Amino acid sequence: MHEMTICESIRGILEDEAARQDFRKVDRVCLDIGRLSGVEVEALKFGFDVAMRGSLAQDARLEIVEMEGRAWCMPCSRSVPIAARFDPCPNCGSHQLQVTGGEEMKIRELEVS
């Protein structure tokens, strides 16, 4: 379950930022998670609660913004939505797609005190 490792990395980032920016508590964490990132959102939510126990984010509310998958279709010369890697272009059926979005994993926003 690599989601637990991701949550432990988030905890480390929060601790580093707390030391750098002088805050003592994290009230809310908002994450951008791309649908093509390979992250299981429910496992991430569970892992977050476990990983944050005993930390400055112990009672933090987790919000996840799921970013849609996008790709550039070479035959169509346009950006198209995709639900999964290796999906065909919804317009022309081509598999000549280059992923351009949906792989994100980042902290979008924090509420701290």
Image: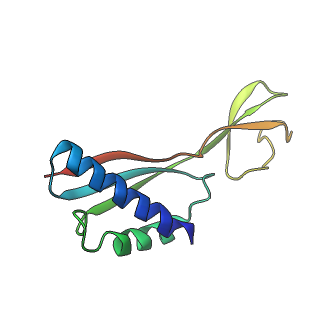
Left or right relative to 66: residue 54:
left
Q: Nearer the viewer, residue 16 or 62?
A: 16
Residue at x 70%, y 53% (from the top left corner): 84
**Residue 49 image offset from top left, x and y in percent:** 35, 72
**Residue 4 image offset from top left, x and y in percent:** 48, 69
Q: Quadrant of the N terminus?
A: bottom right
Q: Nearer the viewer, residue 65 or 6?
A: 6
**Residue 102 image offset from top left, x and y in percent:** 59, 45
Q: Where, by quadrant of the figure, is residue 59 drawn?
A: bottom left
Residue at x 35%, y 60% (from the top left corner): 11
- Number of numbered discs: 0
Left or right relative to 14: residue 80:
right
**Residue 28 image offset from top left, x and y in percent:** 26, 56
Left or right relative to 63: residue 89:
right
Residue at x 21%, y 58% (from the top left corner): 27
Reply above or below: 2 against 66: below
Q: Nearer the viewer, residue 35 or 89?
A: 35
Q: Residue furthest top?
A: 77
Residue at x 79%, y 50% (from the top left corner): 86
